[in-house]
Structure formats: C-alpha cells, structure tokens
Amino acid sequence: MVTEKQLILRLKNGDTDALRALMQLYQDFVYTLVLRIVKSASAAEELTQDIFIKVYKKINTFSGKAKFSTWLYTIAYRTGLNFLEKKKIVFSISDLGPENDEGESTSLLFDSDTGEEDFTLEGNDLQKILWSAIDTLPVTQGVVITLHYLQQFSIKEISELLGIPINTIKTHLFRGRNSMKSLLLKNYSREELL
C-alpha cells in the first residue's frame, strides 16, 4: 500500500497518478469544506477541482512541517474565501467575544460536564439535521465546527490552518455549538435527536 508521504514525493516529481490518488483521499472533505463556505454545490464542485490544480502547481512549496491535510485545507479555505470576495458575497465573522475557558469540548452540542446528553452522528437523518444546522451558522463558525468535530482537528491545528488566534477559534466553537443547540431544540425534541 502506498503511503501519503510516498504519494506526495511522487507528486513533487510530476506524477499525475499520485494527484489522482490524493484526490480520492481528500476530495470529499475538500468539497464539504468549500461547500460550507460558498453555500453552492456547483461552485463547490468547481472550486474543488481548482484546489487540486493548485495543489499540483504548489506541491513543491509543501515542506512537510505541518500535516499534508492541514496544508491542503488551508488552500481550500482560502480558495473559498477568495471566491466569496470576488463574488462580493458578504459573510459575518464573529470577532473576539466571551472566551470559552473550558478549552476543547468533546461534545458537539452539549457539554458533558453539565450533565446534558450529547448528540451523536448516528443515522442519515440526524446527519442531515446537523448539516442543515451547520449551514445556518456564519461561515467561519461552520468551518470551525466542521474541522473540529467532524474532521477531528485540534483547536491549535484549526488556528494554524485558518490563521485565527486560538481564543477566537474557541469562541467560534462555543458560539457555534450554542447556536446549533438553540436551533435544534427549537425545531426538534431531545428524543428525536438522541
């Protein structure tokens, strides 16, 4: 089995089969991330292809100090934001607010420390409900929630990827969770979500 590191080395030598293999590994998440930003399936599909073309052209700038996925997602995030800027689409980014001093939470919607039950991602219906709730969030909150809870990136990794301070990432997670919790409990009973 070929490792990611071997694929990257092959890609640096111009091997387009290595690019196809990396695309198979990452295209679904790149598409999802870009879709969270641009909110258009057709634009997200086109941008996903553009992102992998950029990867091919810029692979020699990848030093290996960070994970390849972090480097790739940074390209995806910036490509999505650039698309919005070119289209003059305005989106809100929450600035620093009350900090979440608890640090990282392991629950997407409820904090285990409060004794409230966690929502899980079991079942297609619940996944659709959660994606729909994520789509209502401001762009940066949706991206941070997606990266942290669905892709298991640490707060530090997200901070590096997005170029946003750690405390701001915590604020986005805190506000995003609270917004999703309010929305979901407004539209569904707790039993439907558990």
Image: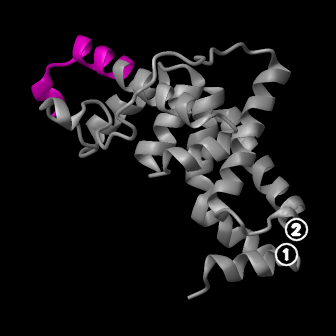
Q: Which residue has dot 2 on it? A: 60
Mark 1 Cα within 10 Å, few/some/many (few <14, many 20+)?
A: some
Quadrant showing the N terminus: bottom right
The Cα–Cα distance between marks 2 and 1, rounded to whole angstroms, is 6 Å
Q: Is residue 118 at all visible to an observer of this figure?
A: no
Residue at 89 percent across and 60 percent down: it is: 57
Instruction: Name, please, the residue furthest toward the front.
Output: 101
Q: Which residue has dot 1 on it? A: 12
Q: Is residue 61 at all visible to an observer of this figure?
A: yes
Residue at 79 percent across and 81 percent down: it is: 10
Circle on res. 134: none
Q: Is residue 96 left or right of residue 66?
A: left
Query: Residue 93 in the image: x percent, y percent?
Result: 62, 18
Q: Is residue 69 magenta?
A: no
Quadrant showing the C terminus: top left
Q: Quadrant of residue 60?
A: bottom right
Q: Is residue 128 left or right of residue 143?
A: left
What range of the chain is rendered magenta? 179-194
Query: Residue 136 in the image: x percent, y percent?
Result: 47, 19
Q: Amino acid at mark 1?
A: Lys
Q: Secondary structure at mark 2?
A: helix
Q: Earlier in the sequence, mark 2 or mark 1?
A: 1
Is 89 situated above or below 61?
Answer: above
